[in-house]
Image: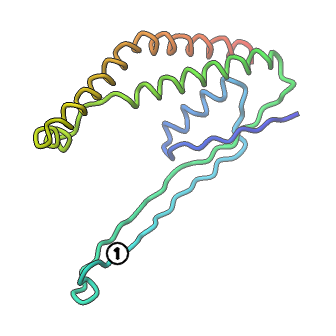
Amino acid sequence: MLETKVVQVANNPDILNRTNEIWGSFGWNVSNVQVTHSQNTKTYTSGFGHWTGDSTVETTTINYATVTYQREKNMENYERVVELENEYAAMETFINQVSKKRGRPSLLAIIFMIIIYPVGILYLAYRIAMMVYYLVNIPKIKKNRERQKAILAEVSSLT
């Protein structure tokens, strides 16, 4: 019996190859790849633009691939492979959540802090707290990455 998983990723050969490599480790085989590339252009006329001919053009480009994977549910060591896959995915979610919270303030944020000092102080405190949060979690991220490598090694021996 086949099960199916659908994943959307950036339409980039390196990202597609890495995604296929990771899911392939858990017994998933690519059954279909659909690339979506579209451009949506909107033109805005505001104020006196309809008399002067001034307008703003905004173009949005969407470029991603939808990959459909399938695997046999009756494959050898299926239950253990699914456990390892779920553990791997949970670690990836944690790593992505922590990584999104770090960063440095932009120039606009710095100017904002100087002009509106109290709000700037609060923002700076928030950014510092997020950096501390990230730094505190670096060992957990490293531990999760090491465990992910171990999971991939174990699952490759099972499939």
Image spot of residue 132 (x, y percent)? 31, 17
- Quadrant of the drawing holding the N terminus: top right
Q: Residue at x 49, y 9 (%)?
A: 143
Q: Which residue is mark 1?
A: 44
Q: Residue at x 64, y 29 (%)?
A: 23
Q: Is residue 134 above or below residue 17?
A: above
Q: Quadrant of residue 150?
A: top right
Q: Residue at x 51, y 14 (%)?
A: 144
Image spot of residue 98 (x, y percent)? 43, 24
The answer to which of 73 and 158 lies nearer the viewer is: 73
Q: Is residue 114 left or right of residue 25?
A: left
Q: Quadrant of residue 74?
A: top right
Q: Is residue 57 above or below residue 143?
A: below
Task: Name the kind of residue labelled 1 in the image.
Answer: Tyr
- Quadrant of the drawing holding the C terminus: top right
The answer to which of 146 and 96 lies nearer the viewer is: 96
- Count of numbered badges drawn on the protein: 1
Image spot of residue 100 (x, y percent)? 40, 31
SS at mark 1 in the image? strand
Q: Is residue 13 left or right of residue 20?
A: left
The answer to which of 36 and 123 lies nearer the viewer is: 123
